[in-house]
Amino acid sequence: MNLKGRSFLTLKDYTKDEILYLIALAAELKKKKKHQECAEGVKGKLLADKNVVLLFDKTSTRTRCSFEVACFDEGAGVTFLTNSQMGKKESLEDTANVLGRMYDGIEYRGFAHKIVEELAEYAKVPVWNGLTDDDHPTQVLADFLTAQEHLGKPLDQMKLCFVGDGRNNVANALFIGATKVGMDFAIAAPKSLFPAEKLRKECEAFAKESGSKITISDDIKEAVKGADIIYTDIWCSMGEEDLMAERIALLKDYQVNDALMAATGNPDCLFEHCLPSFHDLNTTTGKYVKETFGLDEMEVTDKVFRSRNSVVFDEAENRMHTIKAVMVATLSDTLNF
């Protein structure tokens, strides 16, 4: 499959076969990284002589490290850029034109989704979405690879239920990804945090084609029943910290705990989380929430987070392998897979 020259802004732009291809490629690149037998066509430095720039307007651990290590592994040069003139003394269009002449690929992690779209329009090189307010497609590839590794069955035979803020960027990206690949998808959330109607209609169209079943409900037991994967995220996304009291009031009954996991009826149900997580008091935010609201844990209990069902650190590692797959698939001159 040839994806060279394509940007990766949202899974809306990719077919089921293309998404599965990226996950399969990531699995082979992971084998190569671990010095295991891998496909012949992925051997060697697949990004040799390429240069990549990473634009970050939001803080990051997994995304930055994944892009940088992936570049180093495959022989690419990488620049981490947080203090550009983009949008200040220089327009986004002009910045994109400059970067597109210097670099072979551009990653953007920030706020408005239109920024990553405009970068792709003007740069004329592949642009990859490292996270925007609306979407987080690289995260979903890692989540799906992790699910395949642990469940040992195709994605279109799984059910994933997202519990919590059903209209945040991770929930949006999972909704798109699941309905693209035929995975049954549920959201358990208060009605005020249901996904946007426009996205819902788009995903219903994807589901009609793929066979995915959609459940969106404020009834937790209904939504989680039969799930293979329970997924949650922090209750306030970056930039929403002032909504903490409101979100705690809305979502305190949607915490992922032993009772919720048991309600799936599946003792082998996986727990996934994009991280970071407020599952204990070992962060400044966790301590603030304890002092202000009296909570020891937020979106997930420490017990579930550390349980045998939790695969959160496998997901974190797989961010690197799947991001590597996206860059290799869209940039490499030597890939033969």
Image (spheres, rainbow, N blue to C red):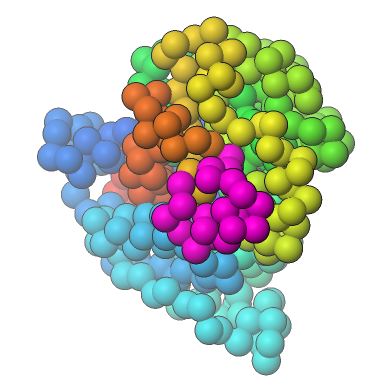
Percent x, y of residue 79: 39, 75
- Horizontal side of 258 relative to 268 (left or right) equals right
Percent x, y of residue 320: 36, 49
Residue 113, quarter of picture: bottom right
* Identity of the residue drawn at 47% across and 68% down: 54
Write down the region rendered in magenta: 280-299
- Horizontal side of 50 relative to 161 (left or right) equals left
* Identity of the residue drawn at 71% across and 13% down: 222
The number of callouts visible is: 0
Q: In the current view of this chain or complex, which residue is farthest to the bottom?
A: 89
- Horizontal side of 24 relative to 161 (left or right) equals left
* Identity of the residue drawn at 24% across and 56% down: 73
Q: Reply above or below: 164 against 149.
A: below
Q: Reply above or below: 282 against 24.
A: below
Which image quarter holds the C terminus? Answer: top left
> Is residue 34 part of the magenta span, yes or no?
no
Percent x, y of residue 120: 62, 62
Residue 71 appears in view: yes
Q: Foreground: 43 or 296?
A: 296
* Identity of the residue drawn at 66% across and 52% down: 293
Q: Foreground: 238 or 63?
A: 238
> Is residue 284 part of the magenta span, yes or no?
yes
Residue 14 appears in view: no
Which image quarter holds the N terminus? Answer: top left
Percent x, y of residue 257: 54, 27
Q: Reply above or below: 9 against 202.
A: below
Q: Foreground: 143 or 288?
A: 288
